[in-house]
Amino acid sequence: MKKKLLILATFILALNLSFAMGDKKHEAKNDKSVEKERFARENPKYIEKEADRVVYEPTKTEIITAKKALNKKGFKVDATTAQIDNKTRKQIKLFQANNTLEMTGELDLATLKELKSKEALSE
């Protein structure tokens, strides 16, 4: 009986130690991923599309406004819809290339900012 109790006590102690070690591993979670999770919770307009990249998700109004600005600049796109099709992506990439931006084909914050500044200058 004592031997069984000793084995049971040893098992419980080992189990507690493994839980404690697991908590330490959890606490040592990559700071970058913790920061990214916090950022995503605090900024619902941002979504995670790739493992290490947080991308801005523009609103429908922002998309239409950006398309109108692209048209004014000579990058012909259909500004009646809030959808970004392949033709629109190509035109966005051309605009980004002409303005020394990263050529993603996405309406990221840098592209929207550049479109707005160019639009304000032309008015």
Image (cartoon, grey):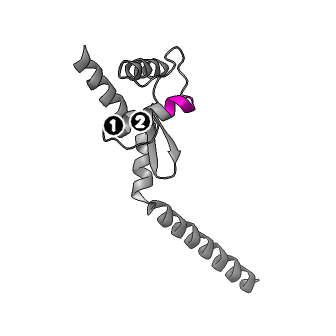
Q: Which residue is mark 1?
A: 98
The quarter of the displayed image where residue 46 is located: top left
Image disc number at residue 50: none
Relative image position of residue 70 (x, y in whole percent): 40, 23
Query: Mark 1 and 2 residues: CB-CB less than 8 Å, in contact?
Result: yes
Tag count in the figure? 2
In magenta, the rendered stretch is 85-89
Q: Quadrant where the N terminus lies?
A: bottom right
- Whether the magenta-drawn stretch holds residue 90 is answered as no
Between 56 and 41, the one nearer to me in the picture: 56
Q: Quadrant where the C terminus lies?
A: top left
Cα gap from disc 1 to disc 2, whole angstroms: 6 Å
Identify residue type, mark 2.
Leu
Task: State the residue at coordinates (41%, 35%).
Answer: 94
Q: Which residue is mark 2?
A: 94
Position above or below: 22 against 44: below
Task: State the residue at coordinates (64%, 79%).
Answer: 10
Task: Tell me the crowding category of disc 1: few under 14, some 14 to 19, or many 20 or more residues within 10 angstroms, Cα based.
Answer: few
Task: Tell me the crowding category of disc 2: few under 14, some 14 to 19, or many 20 or more residues within 10 angstroms, Cα based.
Answer: some
**Residue at disc 1, secondary structure:** helix
Identify residue type, mark 1.
Asn
**Residue at disc 2, secondary structure:** helix
Position above or below: 65 against 58: above
Between 120 and 73, the one nearer to me in the picture: 73
